[in-house]
Amino acid sequence: MTRFNFRFQKILELKENETQLAQVEMAEALKKEQAVREQSEALHSKITQAEEMKKAKEQKGIPISELRMLEEYIHQLYEQSSMASREVAAHERKVSRSQDALKEKAREEKTWGNLKEQNYAAHQKEHQAAEQNFFDDLAGSRYYRLGRTGDVQ
C-alpha cells in the first residue's frame, strides 16, 4: 500500500500551532482579567470599610481635619475604583477579541483537517480500486492459466 501523504500537512500543522497559541493568549487574557477584577473588588471592599469607619468616627465626634482627610481618602478610592472598572472593561474586550481569534483559528484548523480527511478518503478509495484491479487481474490470469491446462471446473 502506498503511504498517504497530505501535501498541505505543513499548513495543517501551522494552523494547529496557531490554534494552540490562540488558546494560550486567551488563557493569559482571562488570567489578567481575573486579576484586575479581583483588584476592583478589593477596592470596593476598602471603600465600604472606609465609609463605615467614617460613619463610626462621625458618631464619636472627630476633628473636621481628620474627617476631611478620611473623605479625601474615600474620594481617592472611588477614583481608583473607577479606573479599575475601566481596566476591567478593557480586559473584557481583550478577552472577547481573543475568544474571536481562537474561534477563527479553530475554524481554519478544522477546514484544513477536513481537507486532509477528504484527501485520505480519496487515497483509500484509489488504493482499494487498485487492489481490486490487482486481484481481478490475478483471478483472470489464474482462470486463463487453468483454462489452458484443462483444469477448469
Image (cartoon, rainbow, N blue to C red):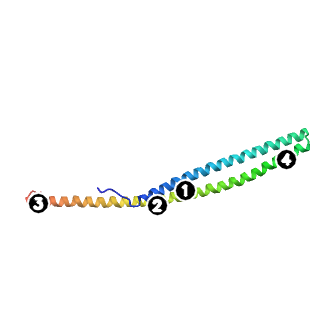
Tell me which label, 4 or 3, sits earlier in the chain: 4
Mark 4 sits on what residue? 71
Disc 4 vs disc 3: Cβ atoms closer than 8 Å?
no
**Image side of residue 74 versus residue 112, left or right:** right
Mark 3: secondary structure: helix
Which of the image's four quarters has the C terminus? bottom left
How far is disc 4 from disc 3 in space, using C-alphas? 111 Å
Q: What residue type is labelled 3?
A: Gly
How far is disc 1 from disc 4 in space, using C-alphas? 46 Å
Q: Which amino acid does label 4 sit on?
A: Glu
The residue located at (58%, 52%) in the rendering is: 26
Mark 2 sits on what residue? 111
Q: Nearer the viewer, mark 1 or mark 3?
A: 1
The residue located at (74%, 46%) in the rendering is: 43
The mark total stands at 4
Mark 3 sits on what residue? 147
Q: Which of 128 and 87 is in front in this view?
A: 87
Category of crowding for the residue at label 4, using alpha-carbon neighbours closer than 10 angstroms: few (below 14), some (14–19), many (at least 20): some
Q: Which amino acid does label 2 sit on?
A: Thr
Mark 2: secondary structure: helix
Mark 1 sits on what residue? 102
Q: Nearer the viewer, mark 3 or mark 2?
A: 2
Tell me which label, 1 or 3, sits earlier in the chain: 1
**Image side of residue 50 versus residue 93, left or right:** right
How far is disc 4 from disc 2 in space, using C-alphas? 60 Å
Q: Where is residue 69 in the image (x, y as percent from the top left)?
A: 85, 45
